[in-house]
Amino acid sequence: MISKNPLLISSKGGTITCLKGDSGKRIYQSCSRNSCIYSSDLHTAKLSLDNLEGANNILPKAK
């Protein structure tokens, strides 16, 4: 299950990827635009991605 390919790509373009940490445990990386958050479980990673994408919507889009 540990891969460089995203486990999830959201409709807003954010991703969740499973990585292997230094201790050998799985770490989930949630990324949207230029921000990433690392979590220890997939549920928290999904919540983090939702928060990142929500925070990104606050900023005005470039014209």
Image: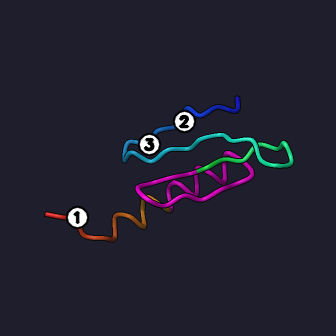
The crowding category of the residue bearing disc 1, from other C-alpha atoms within 10 Å (few below 14, some 14 to 19, many at least 20), is: few
The residue at which mark 1 appears reads as: 61
Residue 46 is covered by the magenta coloring: yes
- Magenta region: 30-51
Of callouts 2 and 1, the N-terminal one: 2
Residue 4 lies left or right of residue 21; in this view the side is: left
Mark carried by residue 6:
2
Residue at 38 percent of width and 42 percent of height: 11
Circles 3 and 2: CB atoms closer than 8 Å? no
* Of marks 3 and 2, the one in the foreground: 2
Residue 45 lies left or right of residue 41; in this view the side is: left
Q: SS at mark 3?
A: loop
> Outermost residue, left direction?
63
Q: SS at mark 2?
A: loop
Residue at 69 percent of width and 55 percent of height: 39
- State which quarter of the image contains the C terminus: bottom left
Amino acid type at image mark 3: Ser
Marks 2/1: CA distance?
25 Å
Question: Above or below — where is 59 with respect to 31?
Answer: below
Mark carried by residue 10:
3
The crowding category of the residue bearing disc 2, from other C-alpha atoms within 10 Å (few below 14, some 14 to 19, many at least 20), is: some
Amino acid type at image mark 2: Pro
Residue closer to the observer: 38 or 12: 38
Q: Residue 13 appears at what percent x and percent y?
A: 39, 45
- State which quarter of the image contains the N terminus: top right
> Outermost residue, top direction?
1
Marks 3/2: CA distance?
10 Å
Of callouts 1 and 3, the N-terminal one: 3
- Which quadrant of the view contains residue 6? top right
The crowding category of the residue bearing disc 3, from other C-alpha atoms within 10 Å (few below 14, some 14 to 19, many at least 20), is: few
Circles 2 and 1: CB atoms closer than 8 Å? no
